[in-house]
Amino acid sequence: MEKKKTLILGATDNPGRYAYLAAQRLAGAGHEIVNIGIKPGEVAGVPIRPAGDVLHDIHTITLYIGPQRQPEYYDYIIATKPQRIIFNPGTENPELRDLAKQHGIATQEACTLVLLSTGQY
């Protein structure tokens, strides 16, 4: 299985959140993760930091913030130039999907946890 460096947008150190579970499972499957969130902390041994420096070696951005909060991250997401964006349930956003497609970024409406558990990640 190809290892895909993944940026988790909406990362949290709250074990009751899906973003936390995704970070744990991605790291456990050997994928390098970058945790971006609004509150500092740590998950899967990786610090949670605010969006800042743009990384250009990200394969996938997996979204865990709702569409109402996404616009403030549009420039950051596009500048990162990931190969794909995963819209987890509740994060679907036609505006961001269209923007991503205009920049040659593949999009997928799916659950990162399901993709991992079924070997489709």
Image (tube, rainbow, N blue to C red):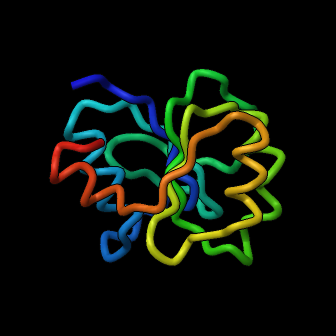
Estimate the x, y position of residue 37 in percent, counting from the top left.
60, 58
Q: Quadrant of the C terminus?
A: top left
* Image side of residue 6 versus residue 94, left or right: left
**x 61%, y 47%: residue:** 49
Numbered disc total: 0
**x 49%, y 53%: residue:** 108
* Image side of residue 61 versus residue 55, left or right: left
Estimate the x, y position of residue 97 in percent, counting from the top left.
67, 57
Estimate the x, y position of residue 30 in percent, counting from the top left.
24, 30
Nearer to us in this view, 34 or 99: 99
* Image side of residue 119 versus residue 62, left or right: left
* Image side of residue 109 versus residue 72, left or right: left
- In the image, residue 36 sits, relative to residue 56, either above or below, namely below
- In the image, residue 57 sits, relative to residue 13, either above or below, namely above
Q: Quadrant of the N terminus?
A: top left
**x 78%, y 42%: residue:** 102
Question: Does the rendering let one see residue 48?
Answer: no
Q: Residue furthest left?
A: 118
Question: Does the rendering let one see residue 61?
Answer: yes
**x 39%, y 70%: residue:** 14
Nearer to us in this view, 104 or 45: 104
Nearer to us in this view, 73 or 119: 119
Estimate the x, y position of residue 80 in percent, counting from the top left.
70, 33
